[in-house]
Amino acid sequence: MGSFRKKAFYWPVWSFAVVFALLSQRCHGSCSEKDLEKREEEANIVLTGTVEEILNMDPVHNTYSCK
């Protein structure tokens, strides 16, 4: 009778583990990600000197005008 209780306890645990594994694999491929070249282009930022004030930010070109 003790082994029946153990099996009854583990059944929901294993069911949850299987469902979680299947759903996590399905969601992994549906995440949108930019192309590597686009991410590299956005990450190439070089600043020299000291920025006292940001005057303007152009959201179209992703550029800043600084003082």
Image: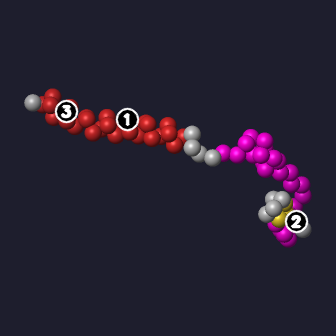
Which disc, if any, is residue 6? 3
- Residue type, mark 1 in image: Val
- Residue type, mark 3 in image: Lys
Q: Residue at x 34, y 40 (%)?
A: 16
The magenta region covers: 33-57
Q: Residue furthest top?
A: 3
Relative side of 54 to 1, left or right: right
The mark total stands at 3
Q: Which residue is drawn at 41% across and 40% down?
A: 20
Q: Where is residue 19 in the image (x, y as percent from the top left)?
A: 38, 39
Pair 3/1: label in front: 1
In terms of secondary structure, where does tag 1 sit? helix
- Dot placed on the residue nearer the N-terminal end, 2 or 1: 1
- Residue type, mark 2 in image: Ser
Q: Where is residue 32 in the image (x, y as percent from the top left)?
A: 63, 47
| Image quadrant in which you'd find residue 29 | top right
Residue assigned mark 2: 65
Label 2 near label 3: C-beta < 8 Å?
Answer: no
Q: Which residue lies furthest to the left in this view?
A: 1
Q: Which residue is drawn at 73% across and 42% down?
A: 35
Relative side of 62 to 13, left or right: right
Q: Position of residue 5 (x, y in %)?
A: 16, 34
Q: How is the image coloured?
A: secondary structure
Q: Which of 45 and 15 is in front in this view?
A: 15
Cα distance between the residues tagged 3 and 2: 67 Å
Residue assigned mark 1: 18
Q: Which residue is drawn at 81% across and 47% down?
A: 41
Pair 2/1: label in front: 1
Does residue 40 belong to the magenta stretch?
Answer: yes
Q: Residues within 10 Å of mark 2 (few under 14, many from 20)?
A: few
